[in-house]
């Protein structure tokens, strides 16, 4: 995982920034279905992270799983931060 962080930091930074923009644009999940979808995606990220940490998938496929887990976690963290900033900023002028 440490080698992936060193080699893929530009992709991780891009995923974090892209998630931040998407989270700011969409905001935090408000409805019941949106919260269920967010919980499902978070559970998927946790499951992928657990598989990556446990090393259940060997070889090249394991590298893909670890990379996907890192990028998904960075994207979700960006979405959470962006949604929180959107919520803290309040309604925009177009929504008033």
Image (cartoon, rainbow, N blue to C red):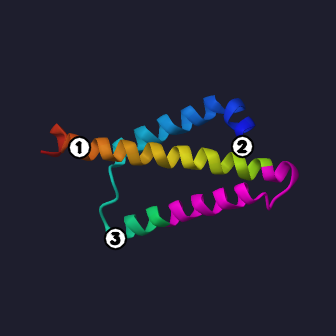
Please give the label number shown on residue 32.
Answer: 3
Residue 67 in the figure: left or right of residue 81: right
- Identify residue for label 1: 88
Tag of residue 24:
none
Asked if residue 43 lies in the magenta stretch, the reply is: yes
Q: Position of residue 60 (x, y in %)?
A: 85, 48
- Local crowd size for mark 2, using a 10 Å CA cut-off: few (<14), some (14–19), many (≥20): few
Residue range corresponding to the magenta coloring: 40-62
Percent position (x, y) of residue 83? 34, 47
Q: CA distance from mark 2 to mark 3?
A: 35 Å
Label 3 residue SS: helix
For marks 2 and 3 on the same chain, the one whose residue lies earlier in the sequence: 2
Mark 1 touching mark 2, by CB under 8 A?
no
Q: Residue at x 32, y 46 (%)?
A: 84
Identify the residue at the far left of this view.
Answer: 96
Relative to 86, residue 32 above or below: below
**Which of the image's four quarters has the C terminus?**
top left
Q: Is residue 85 left or right of residue 69?
A: left
Q: Secondary structure at mark 2?
A: loop
Q: Quadrant of the N terminus?
A: top right
Circles 3 and 1 in contact, beta carbons < 8 Å: no
If you read the primary sequence from the N terminus, does the residue marked by circle 3 or circle 1 appear first? 3
Q: Residue at label 2?
A: 1
Of tags 1 and 2, the one toward the viewer is 2
User: As drawn, which residue projects farthest toward the right?
Assistant: 59
């Amino acid at each position: 995982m440490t080698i992936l962080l060193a080699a893929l930091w530009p992709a991780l930074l891009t995923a974090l920034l892209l998630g931040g923009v998407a989270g700011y644009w969409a905001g935090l999940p408000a409805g019941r279905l949106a919260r269920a979808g967010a919980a499902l995606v978070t559970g998927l990220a946790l499951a992928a992270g657990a598989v990556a940490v446990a090393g259940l998938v060997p070889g090249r496929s394991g590298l893909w799983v670890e990379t996907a887990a890192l990028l998904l976690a960075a994207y979700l963290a960006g979405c959470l931060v962006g949604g929180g900033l959107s919520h803290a900023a309040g309604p925009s002028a177009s929504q008033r």
